Amino acid sequence: MKSKANDLNFLEICNHLYDGIFITDGEARTIFVNTAYERITGIKKESLIGSTVMDLSKNSKYFQGAVS
């Protein structure tokens, strides 16, 4: 249970960072996008969560100006 609380604290901290953060799971599915990422890209997290990197790469608007 402590690990879950630590995960939630980490994500809450990420939401307050100025830098954009985009986190995927082991299957390359988007599991977290912070508010700075939304601000920087103009893409709402609701349209990203659950999508795979491959899905997103098919739509160039998600990767315009992205650095790999």
Image: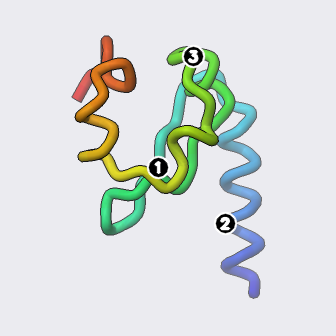
Which residue is tagged 2? 7
Q: Which label is found at residue 23?
A: 1
Q: Position of residue 33 (x, y in %)?
A: 57, 41
**Residue lying at 30% horizontally and 45% vertically, measured from the top left:** 55
**SS of the residue at dot 1?**
strand
Q: Position of residue 25 (x, y in %)?
A: 41, 63
**SS of the residue at dot 3?**
loop
Residue projecting furthest to the bottom: 1
Residue 50 or 21: which is nearer the viewer?
50
Q: Nearer the viewer, mark 1 or mark 3?
A: 3
* Up-down relation of residue 33 to residue 7 (above or below): above
Q: Nearer the viewer, mark 2 or mark 1?
A: 1
In contact (CB < 8 Å): disc 2 and disc 1 = no
**Residue lying at 62% horizontally and 30% vertically, measured from the top left:** 44
**SS of the residue at dot 2?**
helix
Q: Position of residue 68 (x, y in %)?
A: 22, 29
Residue 14 or 27: which is nearer the viewer?
27
Disc 1: CA contacts within 10 A as few (<14), some (14-19) or many (>=20):
few
Residue 52 or 7: which is nearer the viewer?
52
In the image: residue 55, left or right of residue 30: left
**Residue lying at 63% horizontally and 17% vertically, measured from the top left:** 39
Disc 2: CA contacts within 10 A as few (<14), some (14-19) or many (>=20):
few
Which residue is tagged 3? 42
Earlier sequence position, callout 3 versus callout 2: 2
Q: Amino acid at mark 2?
A: Asp
